[in-house]
Amino acid sequence: MKLQLVLSAVLCTILGFTSVFAQTNARVEKIQGIETYVMCEPLRAYETVFEIASGAKAASLFTGGVVNEGVSEKAAQFVRRASKDGKKDNKAFDAVVISGSKTAIAVKFKEEAGANKGLAKVRKIDGLAVYVMNEPLLDYETVVDASGGVKAKSYFTGGIVNNSIEEDVEQFVRRVKKEATEAKKPIDAIVYSSGKRAIGIKFKE
C-alpha cells in the first residue's frame, strides 16, 4: 500500500513538471521561410553566425512618431536584414533569434532537426509566460484581449527613437493583465500573434 502511494506521488510530481514545462514551450512561426524566435530560446543548441541591428522605422519617421511599426513588423525587418546581410557576406544561417532588444542574431543549429525543430522555451514577464509570434503547445482558450496604442517614446522623439520589441510586449502585458484584473478573470499566459493586439489565455485541462 505504501509503495503504491509513493509511486502515485512520484507520478503526480512527474506529470506536474511535464505540464509546467509544456506551458512554457511553443512552436515558432516562420517569416519569409525562416524560423524566427522572438523573445524565446530555441530548444536546439545553436551558434551565432552574425549579429543583426535594426534601423529607424520608416513609418514612424514619416509620421512624426504617430504611426510606429508593431512587433510583427519589427521582427520581419530583422529577418529581411538578416537575409540581405547573409547573402551579401555569403553566410548561411538556419534561424533568427530576437531577444527583444534592438539587435538580433542569425544562428546555425549544432544538431540535426528532430523532435525539437521549431520549438522554443518562452520568456516570462511579470510571472506570466508570454508567447510572441509563436503558439503554445497546449490547447487554450481566450479569456481577454487588448489592443495597443501610440508608442510614447516614438511620439515624443518624432519617430527617431522607437520602442524595442521587448518594450512593446511589456506594454501588451500590462494592458492584458489590467483587462484580466478588471474582468476578474485569471489567465495563465499572454499570446501575441501580429498587429497591435494581444490576448490573455487559459490553458485547457
Image (cartoon, rainbow, N blue to C red):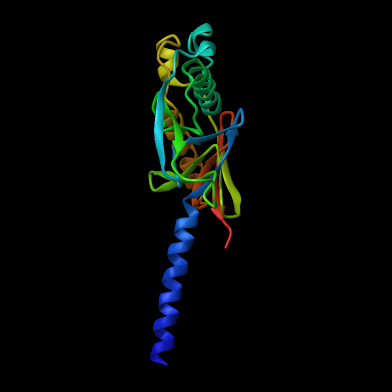
As drawn, is 10 to the left or to the right of 202? left
The image shows residue 200 at horizontal and vertical percentages of 53, 45
Query: Which quarter of the figure has residue 124?
Result: top left
The image shows residue 60 at horizontal and vertical percentages of 50, 13
The image shows residue 157 at horizontal and vertical percentages of 40, 11
Query: Which quarter of the figure has residue 174?
Result: top left
Image quadrant where one finds the C terminus: bottom right
Q: Is residue 5 above or below residue 102?
A: below
Q: Looking at this view, name the residue that lies furthest to the bottom.
A: 1
The image shows residue 130 at horizontal and vertical percentages of 47, 43
User: Who is closer to the viewer here, 52 or 176?
Assistant: 52
Image quadrant where one finds the N terminus: bottom left
User: Who is closer to the viewer here, 195 or 80?
Assistant: 80
Query: Which quarter of the figure has residue 156?
Result: top left
User: Who is closer to the viewer here, 34 or 196?
Assistant: 34
Residue under the point 45% across and 12% down? 56
Residue under the point 49% across and 21% down? 86
Residue under the point 39% across and 32% down? 48
Q: Is residue 145 above or below residue 141?
A: above
